[in-house]
Amino acid sequence: MKKQLITIVGPTAVGKTELAINLANHFNTEIVSADSRQFYKELNIGTAKPTKKELESNKHHLIDNISISQEYNISQFEKDADTLINKIFLKNDYAILVGGSGLYIDAVLYGLDNIPEVDPSIRKKLNDEFEKKGIDELLSKLSDLDNESLKTIDVNNPRRVIRALEVTISTKKPYSAFLKSKNRKSKYNNIIIGLNRNRSELHEIINKRVDKMIKRGLIDEVSSLTDFKELNALNTIGYSEIFKYLSQEYSYEKAIEKIKTNSRRYAKRQLTWFNSNKSINWFIDKYDISEVIKLIETT
């Protein structure tokens, strides 16, 4: 039998982890995470990591594999994920890749985009501009130069915004054009399963999950990381908003509402990214696991 990579994608909170575990149990295989924030050992509640029980139910890879103080980029991730998937294939016919980070999923499936090196002085200038004027100024500039990028990148992450701008300015070509120009032939014999819910139901699930995170102790978790809040790993939804609450920039209620709003916007960007991939087999709302298994086994 030809080895097959089962890839599970979809917006935040849609149920990707549950499906991955169920499929891993059925096919007796292992799971490789492609969530760009679950790599970090110190980030737990706010990244919605699988529970201890879920992690023990199947072998998971690339969760809790680095510290927030370590440098880890998408190129390193691609190499690590490829190595792990090929190791799994030595003993299993199937491997599972799961996550909502479109760039990281695509890096594994199709390889990294061939983006030219940029002038370091442009990056420095943009970083200086961010320090002086904040992210809104950069977003306004990116909107003028490459509005398409705003639909897919994490606009709450200054590093991603600066990356899009530096490539656009340096190459005089929109960053989004590089993302769309990749060779869409997968490196693997691959099937992609996409999960989604109707918009209102997904929003309700997201809101409830945020409330659950707060009850589980998100504020205490973020508070314990205050000394590291300038690190890129902590420029993420759920952490940025609580830091602003702790510094009294936001009220308690505003911080929670901001997390919910930013999570919903992130889900929209995720869907925009994944909807451009016509290879995805979508399962909307409730699905029968047997139908997913049948699709995999007959593809």
Image (cartoon, rainbow, N blue to C red):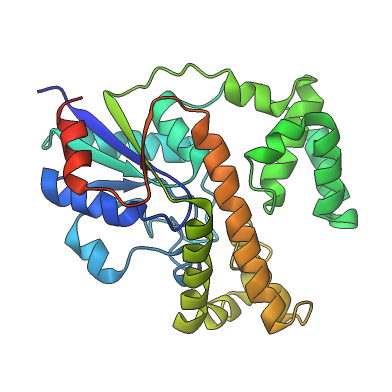
Quadrant occupied by the N terminus: top left
Residue at 85% from the left image edge and 34% from the top image edge:
144
Which residue occupies the foreground of this view, 130 or 191? 191
Quarter holding residue 143: top right
Q: Relative to 167, does residue 52 appear above or below in the rendering?
A: below
Quadrant occupied by the C terminus: top left
Q: With 258 as the anchor, is 295 left or right in this view?
A: left
Residue 246 % position (x, y): 69, 81
Q: With 187 as the anchor, is 21 left or right in this view?
A: left
Q: Report the label total.
A: 0
Residue 276 % position (x, y): 53, 28
Residue at 54% from the left image edge and 44% from the top image edge:
270
Residue 136 % position (x, y): 83, 52
Of all residues, the one furthest to the right in this rendering is 132
Q: With 180 as the anchor, is 109 left or right in this view?
A: left
Q: Relative to 157, does residue 216 appear above or below in the rendering?
A: below
Residue at 44% from the left image edge and 41% from the top image edge:
77
Residue at 51% from the left image edge and 33% from the top image edge:
275
Is residue 280 visible in this depiction of the protein?
Answer: yes
Is residue 242 visible in this depiction of the protein?
Answer: no
Q: With 240 as the anchor, is 208 left or right in this view?
A: left
Q: Relative to 208, does residue 81 appear above or below in the rendering?
A: above
Residue 15 % position (x, y): 36, 55
Which residue occupies the foreground of this view, 147 or 281? 281
